[in-house]
């Protein structure tokens, strides 16, 4: 008989538990319409910053590419000329591409950069149906001149909303119709620049 | 209004009332489904369906459209005639029960389609036929899991219907009538609702009613974790939808009967007579439905042998004892 009453008590407790949950607030965030605020140093899509005078910060030193544990970054530097001066230093990045499918968003590139040129923004919505579109070249990485100079991670206020500005909306000019292999980086990987062939 | 209704030929009145009740009942089904999904979601800390229309209110319409445009498959091993007939049998019996349910006080028979003297017997007869819909569906599918579901359904329905009928007979003895409106009158103003003198009967009724409608925690018939989809595994599209409607209509039926038998039907509470009887009735039936959903979110599915043990070794003896005690007291008091 004791077991009987214990069973009834357990039943009542169970019903009270579900009933009390009935009045609790759901923690669900209706994602596309409501966006969560995330940490100020959230590691998202990269951005190449500029100086106040509009010159590119990147000096094409390839330290980010060397620091990258996923080999996602490819930099090819070129000499600045007096007629075409892109960065204050001697060299600038003629090509700068990040394969966001390889990237693990660790932020080591950001730490390695001697000029604070490459930073990780909190943007994370970059899904697409085509693999080639995940190779971000300078056309999409570099802050457009009208959008300012970009923000260093330690300058960001707390609780930045995730939909940060229009930079991500820029269409890639990289040729992506031929698929991943047709991209410049895809062919580069095949020609064994870093022993990555195969 | 009443003059107009009284001047109509009887057949026309019945047709109009049937069409109206059918419309209301099917709408209630649609929103009972949404209500269930919402309540379950809230109890599980989810928002529930909220994409279609404000608060997801158009979700039933979206579901119906989806069901209608899905492919209607018939397995090659199925018996095509019975396979196609079974869902209609389920639905027809589920709908026919509403013909005798009185929704409110009506001297002129306005609030029920047919006020049958043996209303409660008619409903039990129909729900017994409803078992055939499920059994035939499982058997004619020509597939193993539906067959297992059908066998379970037959065994479960038979064993729980016994206890259910026993629990209801206690009420019939107290009311001394089998007419549903008569039973409600017996609980009329100034008298106890039968949930008080027949508390054991009421508990047995709600347990067996859940088993009769094949709902959790007694949904062994369609136990997803064991039987894929149970008796409706092979059904798709509109035919699956018919089983779905039948299940919910059965749930609404047992909620209505529970209200009529144990909660005084349309009788008001605390002397709040200015609220119409139909509102009281719907409120009580709605509480019943909420209780079913609450049960489903709280309790896990029973093991099959325990289900049988519970039905035959606990519910049936208790229901019989309850009936005997009730009959003895009535006889003793003369």
Image (cartoon, coloured by chain):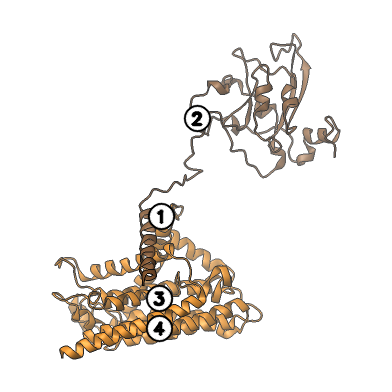
Q: Is residue B254 visible?
A: yes
Write down the quadrant of residue B4 in the picture: bottom left
Query: Residue B161: which disc?
Result: 4
Disc 3 marks which residue? B250
Q: How many marks?
A: 4
Residue A107: % across, % down = 64, 28
Asked whether B89 or B261 is in front, the reply is B261
Q: Residue at x 48, y 43 (%)?
A: A33
Q: Residues within 10 Å of mark 1 (few under 14, many from 20)?
A: many
> Is disc 4 surrounded by few (<14), some (14 to 19) or many (20+) residues within 10 Å?
many
Tag 4–tag 2 contact (CB < 8 Å): no
Q: Residue at x 28, y 81 (%)?
A: B13
Give the colour chain A carries in the figure: brown
Q: Which residue is mark 1?
A: B42
Q: In the figure, residue B48 lies in which quadrant?
A: bottom left
Q: Earlier in the sequence, mark 1 or mark 4?
A: 1
How far apart marks 4 and 2 lie (CA) works out to: 62 Å
Marks 3/1: CA distance? 24 Å
User: In the figure, what tint was chain B given?
Assistant: orange
Residue bearing mark 2: A160
Residue at horizontal 77 percent and vertical 36 percent from the top: A183
| The one of B135 and B203 positioned closer to us in this rendering | B203
Q: Judge from the rendering whether residue A22 lies leftward or rightward of residue A68; answer left or right.
A: left
């Amino acid at each position: 008989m004791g077991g009987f009453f214990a069973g009834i008590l357990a039943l009542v407790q169970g019903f009270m538990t579900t009933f009390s949950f009935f009045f609790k607030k759901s923690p669900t965030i209706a994602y596309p319409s409501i966006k969560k605020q995330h940490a100020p140093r959230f590691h998202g899509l990269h951005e190449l910053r500029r100086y106040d005078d509009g010159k590119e910060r990147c000096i094409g030193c390839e330290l980010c590419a060397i620091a990258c544990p996923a080999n996602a970054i490819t930099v090819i530097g070129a000499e600045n000329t007096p007629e075409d001066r892109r960065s204050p230093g001697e060299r600038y990045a003629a090509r700068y591409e990040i394969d966001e499918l390889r990237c693990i968003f660790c932020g080591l590139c950001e730490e390695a950069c001697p000029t604070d040129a490459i930073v990780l923004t909190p943007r994370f919505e970059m899904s697409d149906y085509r693999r080639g579109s995940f190779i971000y070249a300078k056309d999409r990485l570099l802050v457009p001149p009208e959008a300012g100079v970009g923000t260093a991670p330690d300058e960001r206020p707390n609780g930045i909303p995730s939909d940060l500005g229009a930079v991500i909306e820029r269409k890639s000019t990289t040729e992506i119709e031929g698929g991943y292999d047709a991209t410049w980086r895809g062919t580069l990987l095949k020609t064994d620049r870093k022993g990555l062939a195969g | 209004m009443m003059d107009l209704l009284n001047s109509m030929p009887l057949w026309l009145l019945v047709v109009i009332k049937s069409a109206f009740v059918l419309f209301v009942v099917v709408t209630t089904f649609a929103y009972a489904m949404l209500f269930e999904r919402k309540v379950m979601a809230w109890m599980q800390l989810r928002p529930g369906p909220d994409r279609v229309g404000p608060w997801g209110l158009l979700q039933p319409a979206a579901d119906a459209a989806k069901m209608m445009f899905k492919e209607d498959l018939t397995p090659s091993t199925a018996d095509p005639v019975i396979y196609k007939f079974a869902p209609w049998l389920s639905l027809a019996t589920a709908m026919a029960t509403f013909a005798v349910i009185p929704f409110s006080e009506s001297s002129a028979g306005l609030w029920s389609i047919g006020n049958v003297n043996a209303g409660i017997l008619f409903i039990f007869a129909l729900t017994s036929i409803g078992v055939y819909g499920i059994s035939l569906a499982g058997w004619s599918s020509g597939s193993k899991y539906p067959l297992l579901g059908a066998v379970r359904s037959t065994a479960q329905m038979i064993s729980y219907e016994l206890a259910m009928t026993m629990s209801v007979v206690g009420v019939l003895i107290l009311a001394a009538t089998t007419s549903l409106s008569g039973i409600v009158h017996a609980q009329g103003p100034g008298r106890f609702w039968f949930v008080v003198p027949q508390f054991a009967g009421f508990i047995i009724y709600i347990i067996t009613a859940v088993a009769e409608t094949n709902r959790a925690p007694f949904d062994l018939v369609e136990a997803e974790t064991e039987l894929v989809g149970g008796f409706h595994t092979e059904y798709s599209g509109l035919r699956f939808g018919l089983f779905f409607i039948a299940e919910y209509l059965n749930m609404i039926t047992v909620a209505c009967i529970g209200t009529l038998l144990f909660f005084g039907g349309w009788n008001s509470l605390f002397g709040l007579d200015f609220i119409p009887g139909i509102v009281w009735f719907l409120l009580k039936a709605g509480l019943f439905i909420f209780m079913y959903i609450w049960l489903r979110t709280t309790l896990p599915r029973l093991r099959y042998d325990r289900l049988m043990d519970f039905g035959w070794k606990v519910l049936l003896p208790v229901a019989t004892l309850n009936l005997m005690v009730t009959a003895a007291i009535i006889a003793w008091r003369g």
